[in-house]
Image (cartoon, helix red, strand yellow):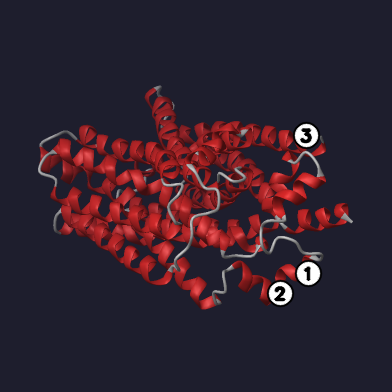
Amino acid sequence: MHTRMINNIFNCHPVLRADFPTMASSEAFLRRFSRRPGVFMTDCSTLDSPATRVSQAGGLSASAILLIEIALAAGGFGIGTGEFVIMGLLPEVATTYGVSVPQAGHVISAYALGVVLGAPIIAALAAKLPRKTLLLILMGTFALGNFMSALAPGFLSFTALRFITGLPHGAYFGVAALVASSMAPPHRRVRAVGRVMLGLTIATLIGTPIATFLGQLMDWRAAFLMVSAIGALAVALIAIYLPKDKVVEGASMLRELSAFGRVQVWLSMAVAAVGFGGMFSIFSYIAKTVTDTAGLPASMVAVVLALFGIGMNVGNVLGSRMADYSLNGTIGGMLAFNIALMSVFSLTAHNPIMLCICVFLTGCGFAACPAVQTRIMDVAAEAKTLAAATIHSAFNIANALGAWLGGLVITAGYGYGATGYVGAVLSALGLVIFLISIGLEQKTSRS
């Protein structure tokens, strides 16, 4: 009886399936999960019933869930716009503060450092806060940080404010992903996470260009005021539409920190930090690749960047759907796809048509990001908040690693097109790490 019941639960619940190998016996499994309301069911078909969906969403209607996802995505839209707009406004910032453009670029590094450090620290310290309260604090801090950035009197204070503004980034996306996935049935969890991340991908296509244009037309400070306004709007939407929640039973800093004691959490972060560095290796130098390697006019840079943004949105939507059918298959498949794609990028970067196609498909590589986000939440067991937030630190490490290695091959004289080879190598390393992760998971499951 117990075995049949466990098998039913195991097949219906991928989150529980991630925990199952750690259970010493079926009795331990039953003792642990029988305390969770709504966990036990004897037939997977009930998972798709309207009653089950309402129960999992806390009695929320489909329209209420949609409004919550829009509110969470609005925050992602503001964060995405604020993160990338500075890249197009560095010359104006440098002129205002009397520094060189490379010196002005330090504010990008300061923001990234804030993301990397802020995600795990905030997730651990805020373990006993309700998720709605935490999201309001994080987005409020982001909005205030951008408002103060627009008023910064000197370059040092501006750099410090960019660091502070980056602190809520990873924690916000992590907690928002947890909220979204908790409202969805198991077979649609990744799509729910993808809809929240859609705010970030749409920002690369719409938010950043508009803010950059506004900053160039008026003053770069206006762009940060715009981002602050988006953040304030997200705060209002979250306050209105996200229901009050209680602190998760047993939540504590120590429980969250236990995520760092799980090998699978570290391997998932390594997959993100290494395997997705290739996208940033190409994207960081795409402007010079367009003009110097493909021989296109500077006016085409905006078009190519738009293709990258469209690719990210297409990848986010399609990748979320694929991952709901096969989470691990999507991650491994996209890493293998990137190895081939980025090699082709380097071989054909001199051809304008092939360059545009490869840039679009490189953006589509974002398809694996919602899957990686969901996988780390699964393998983290009860320390989901810290793991979900820290994966965004890993993505920012991928950004820095890809840009650094890409710069090395360019400096060595291999040309801007060679950044694709860097991406292919990083994707291959990420795939190796992922296969090791799967192998260890299967070995643990068998034992």
50 and 347: which is toward the camera: 50
Dot 2 corresponds to which residue?
49
Q: Relative to residue 276, is residue 112 drawn left or right?
A: left
Which amino acid lies under the numbered mark 2 shown in the image of this protein?
Ser
Q: Is residue 57 above or below residue 130?
A: below
Quadrant position of residue 212: bottom left
Q: Report whether residue 30 is seen.
A: yes
Dot 3 corresponds to which residue?
443
Which amino acid lies under the numbered mark 1 shown in the image of this protein?
Ser
Most extreme residue toward the right is 1
Give the numbered dot on residue 45.
1
Residue 159, position as x, y percentages in the image: 22, 38
Q: Give the total of numbered labels.
A: 3
Q: Tags 2 and 1 in contact by the CB under 8 Å rule?
A: yes
Describe the element under mark 2 as helix, strand or loop.
loop
444 and 368: which is toward the camera: 444
Residue 398, position as x, y percentages in the image: 46, 36
Quadrant showing the C terminus = top right
Residue 131, position as x, y percentages in the image: 45, 57
Q: Earlier in the sequence, mark 3 or mark 2?
A: 2
Task: Please name the residue shown 75% across and 70% down the image.
Answer: 46
C-alpha gap between disc 2 and disc 1: 7 Å
Q: Earlier in the sequence, mark 1 or mark 3?
A: 1
Task: Please name the residue shown 20% across and 58% down the image.
Answer: 225
Residue 437, position as x, y percentages in the image: 67, 35
